[in-house]
Amino acid sequence: MHHFEDIYPFSAISGQEPMKKALILNAINPRIGGVLITGEKGTAKSTAARALAHLLPYRLVVNGCIFGCDPADKNGLCPDCQKKYPSLETITARMRVIELPISATEDKVIGSLDIEHALKKGEKRFEPGILAQAHRNILYVDEINLLNDHIVDVLLDAAAMGMNFIEREGVSYSHPSSFILVGTMNPEEGELRPQLLDRFGLCVDIEGIHDPIARVDIIRRRMEYEHDPDTFIRSWASREEELRERIVRAQTLLPRVLVSDRMLLLIAQICIDMNVDGHRADITMMKTAATVAAYNGRTEVTEDDVREVAPLVLTHRMRRKPFSEQQMDMQKIEQSIRNFTKEDQQPHHESPRDDENPLHQNAAPDGSTTTQFPEETPYSVTPYPLTPVHRHDAIQRNGNGRRTVTESPDGRYVRSCIPKMPGPDIALDATIRAAASHQKQQTGELAITIEPSDIREKVRERKMGTTLLFVVDASGSMGAERRMVAVKGAILSLLIDAYQKRDRVGLVTFHGNRADVLLSPTSSVDLARSSMRTLPVGGKTPLALGLIKGLEVLKREQKINQYSIPQLILISDGKANVSLGSGSPFDDARTIAAHIRDAKISSCVIDTEQGFLSLGLARKISDDLGARYVKLEDLADGHLERIVQGFGM
């Protein structure tokens, strides 16, 4: 077992230079807003975060303060330290990595009221949460895309403001919470909503290194570290110290970095050309470019600084069409810079009017005006005014009936109730209101007398998503290609919807003698695109196998995500010619359909039967499933997604 000091050196991490650069820039300037690291597992994401914390120098903290307040920052002190100021006892401490588990509740993240102390003393006292521990540290959130959306909102609010505002049981409380936010995610497991993506300052998309020599170097370094950590760490100590000193120099230099209006115009033009929504990208690019300049020992931002940070700032903010590659078009950025430089160098024959000039104008002796760029605009890292942000609890989901809420122990507190058996999740505000009527008769040491009948319990709710699984006949029967075209369009449409909500879409096809999961339930358009490049068709029709595979997928999904509603869409003409044993293939399918109905899985059958003579087989399967029944030709303009989006209402 390694000691705390036995941390793999940051400088020794081979490759992944964009990730390392993004982490260093956030260490120099936490106001950039954190970094989201996307990509496959095993690419040194958590190793880099821990190594960065160990790399950074020791700093002064107030001894005994759970927030680790900076004694030199009077305005940033917590309420307890403000009362003691200036008599603060200080110690030195190293920055830590605080990890936030996926299962964390809102109370665990933002903090909660100490109920026992409130009842005994009649005073408010808060039990600090993870955001308190994260102050002046690194908050590492692995698989951030799997967190509840309201938890992500809380994290990003605190990261943006440097404060955590708590509203609990009718009592308000706030404390400093300025941290370096490092989030990681695998896009194949689902994506963050665009609104949340935009609030991360930087984003890095990383993948495994494919050069054999580079991979061997990674293996060799890791083996040396595990064989003798102390010797390995000492061998990298000089490079670690050099990088540490460079970061400290950049932090000192950053307040003096100047951004000319010309560079601000370039940043704005790039964001316009890259079709980025809002203004957060412009502001973040300015901050990041200034930080790069400080890191390189300069006090003025250049075009190269802007060019270097553009991919980090814009990758996750560009508008995307579903099923299109998310790639940074560096050629487009270069063209934007060239166009800007070319226009900037051209002589201006006509001077714009005062109300048209975006910058400053000076009057010439002859009465004409000339546009002049100021020499420079100072960049400042002075914290912005901190004001609380009031979030509204969006419990009811917009859209169709598939978006619902359910009671959940890790959801948001929405109301109170009288408990059958009192538990630990007491609704103090409602309990005190219930006890208010008999406080004149109170006796004893308690500030408030609480009778057993006064106890109220919190009711918590969280959003429910849908796992929608298509089970599609891909056999050689007529209309197979038509079915596949319809299914592709429906999945595309549903994934657009799922991009903003907690829905997941999957695809099972059956043909020949097998049923295959072509797309495991996901909300990732990238994974869906790659999985559905080719959809095989042809062969016999093993309908029972397709239904069995669909049932297996949805049952597994229920175990993984208990807050998802399973729903099955069968697209078939109901014909079956592959049996599970010696019985009738169609009877096998009807038996499995009944099992799906008994498993409480909602279903919809899209009948693709064609021709004048109708056998009605799909109708019988639909009856066994207890499903909604629709004929393919009844779908207006072939829009299968319209039927599916109304399914479950």
Image (spheres, helix red, strand yellow):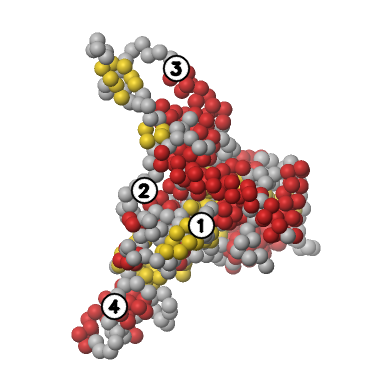
From what the image shows, is residue 634 above or below residue 55?
A: above
The residue tagged with tag 1: helix, strand or loop? loop
Q: Residues within 10 Å of mark 2 (few under 14, many from 20)?
A: few
- Mark 2: which amino acid? Pro
**In the rendered image, which quarter is residue 375 located in?**
top left
- Mark 4: which amino acid? Gly
The disc, 4 or 3, on the residue closer to the chain's N-terminal end is 4
Q: Mark 2 points at which residue?
A: 383
Q: Name the residue under label 3.
A: 345
Depth check, mark 4 against mark 2: the one in front is 2
The disc, 2 or 3, on the residue closer to the chain's N-terminal end is 3
Cβ atoms at labels 4 and 3 below 8 Å apart: no
Is residue 118 visible in this depiction of the protein? yes
Q: Distance between the residues labelled 1 and 3?
A: 48 Å
- Mark 3: which amino acid? Gln
Depth check, mark 4 against mark 3: the one in front is 3
Q: Distance between the residues labelled 4 and 2?
A: 35 Å
Instruction: Report the quarter where the N terminus lies.
Output: bottom right
Q: Is residue 212 or residue 64 the one in the foreground?
A: 64
| Residue 605, x across and y down, in percent | 58, 53
Q: Is residue 543 or residue 498 the one in the foreground?
A: 498
Q: Mark 4 points at which residue?
A: 122
Q: Name the residue under label 1.
A: 58
- Mark 1: which amino acid? Tyr
